[in-house]
Image (spheres, rainbow, N blue to C red):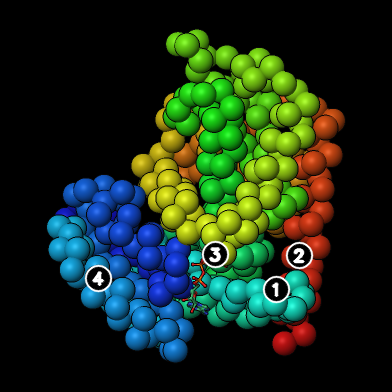
Amino acid sequence: MVGIAEPLRVLVTGAAGQIAYSLLFGIAKGDVFGKDQSLILVLLDITPMMPVLNGVVMELEDCALPILKEVIATDKEAEAFKDLDVAILVGSMPRREGMERKDLLKANVKIFKSQGAALDKYSKKTVKVLVVGNPANTNCLIASKSASSIPKENFTCLTRLDHNRAQSQIAVRLGIPAKDVKNVIIWGNHSSTQFPDVNHAKATVKGKTIGVYEAVQDDSWLKGDFITTVQQRGAAVIKARKLSSAMSAAKAICDHVRDWWFGTHEGEFVSMGVISDGNSYGIPEDLIYSFPVAIKNQSWKIIEGLPIDDFSREKMKLTADELVDERDTALQFISSE
Ligand code: NAI
């Protein structure tokens, strides 16, 4: 592990974008790696965004933060990926009006193949990678496949925002703080096929910790509107804000990386998109699929053996099928290049 005195080198891509604007402050003030861990923040964006990125650098300087040792802003992958401890890949090609899903996937395969190769070539072999840019699961798989010298376990994608949304929906329904809802699960893809599952979740109500089904006492809501609300929350935020989730995405990124770094509490799990080896819950291998994980010594482990009913199994398969399809299309693009 890196000693306290050594600064960590942390890359954020898409650094001139709206998620990064909230995220960089969270990281630089110590929300992720602790208040005593000094940091070198490396910011990557595309060339036309360099003037905007310079403004972000100015603001980071003006925050006068105690642990921020250095900020490096660049549009060059060779510089951005050098000696990294952590890479948070937020930047991706956005979906423009009239753009087909296939075209979006193709543009992103290109970006994440190139960034995977840059991780392979320039970063530490221990680098921890979090992919946020959509389609996050498949982008993450492509980056991992393009970085054969870095363990597959070091590649994860963000489903913590969906996890936090599910946790919060239950908390609001029960009139309790979000911290009193634990062990919700997001299975599968960070898309509208994801399966938010509270069969194994617990809520603390009036000092008593019980299962969420018992606490809510409304199975049809839990199997219906609750699931669709979480699945479509991103679209609802876009409709309301005319911009996609940024503050909550940045918070979820901080949660994901902090838990990866420091571990999860005993008996608790969180959702993360991680590599499936084909041995968990009947999910096919070679997908980045969101599972419940517990983390110790900076290594995640899938929580095995949870009982799965038919309703859940069907939903877990549906989102796996979508990921298989996305992966196969992405791999076709790579082989036809
Ligand atoms: P944004 O459009 O405000 O910022 C994206 C930034 O990425 C832009 O500055 C752009 O120039 C940059 N960029 C594009 N290509 C790049 C490349 N090859 N290298 C480096 N930078 C590049 O978008 P926002 O709101 O910050 O969202 C970023 C991504 O995160 C989107 O793909 C969005 O769909 C995704 N997202 C994922 C979530 C998740 O839970 N997994 C949640 C919310 C957003």
Q: Are marks 4 and 3 in contact (CB under 8 Å)?
A: no
Label 3 packing within 10 angstroms: few (<14), some (14-19), many (20+): few
Residue holding disc 1? 105
Residue 264: x %, y % from top left:
44, 35
The residue type indicated by label 1 comes to Leu
Q: How far is disc 1 from disc 4 in space, using C-alphas?
A: 33 Å
Q: Is residue 18 above or below residue 106?
A: above
Residue 93: x %, y % from top left:
59, 76
Pick the residue in front: 22 or 88.
Answer: 22
Q: How far is disc 3 from disc 1 in space, using C-alphas?
A: 21 Å
Q: Is residue 170 left or right of residue 335?
A: left
Q: Are marks 1 and 2 in contact (CB under 8 Å)?
A: yes
Label 2 packing within 10 angstroms: few (<14), some (14-19), many (20+): many
Q: Is residue 24 left or right of residue 317?
A: left
Label drawn at residue 243: 3
Q: Earlier in the sequence, mark 4 or mark 3?
A: 4
Residue holding disc 2? 326
Q: How far is disc 4 from disc 3 in space, using C-alphas?
A: 22 Å
Q: Earlier in the sequence, mark 2 or mark 3?
A: 3
Q: Is mark 4 within 8 Å of ligand 1?
A: no
Q: Tell me what residue is drawn at x 73 percent, y 29 percent.
A: 221
The residue type indicated by label 4 comes to Glu
Q: Tell me what residue is drawn at x 26 percent, y 47 percent.
A: 34
Q: Quadrant of residue 222?
A: top right
Q: How far is disc 4 from disc 2 in space, using C-alphas?
A: 38 Å
Q: Secondary structure at mark 4?
A: helix
Depth check, mark 4 against mark 2: the one in front is: 4
Q: Earlier in the sequence, mark 1 or mark 4?
A: 4
Residue holding disc 4? 59
Q: Earlier in the sequence, mark 1 or mark 2?
A: 1
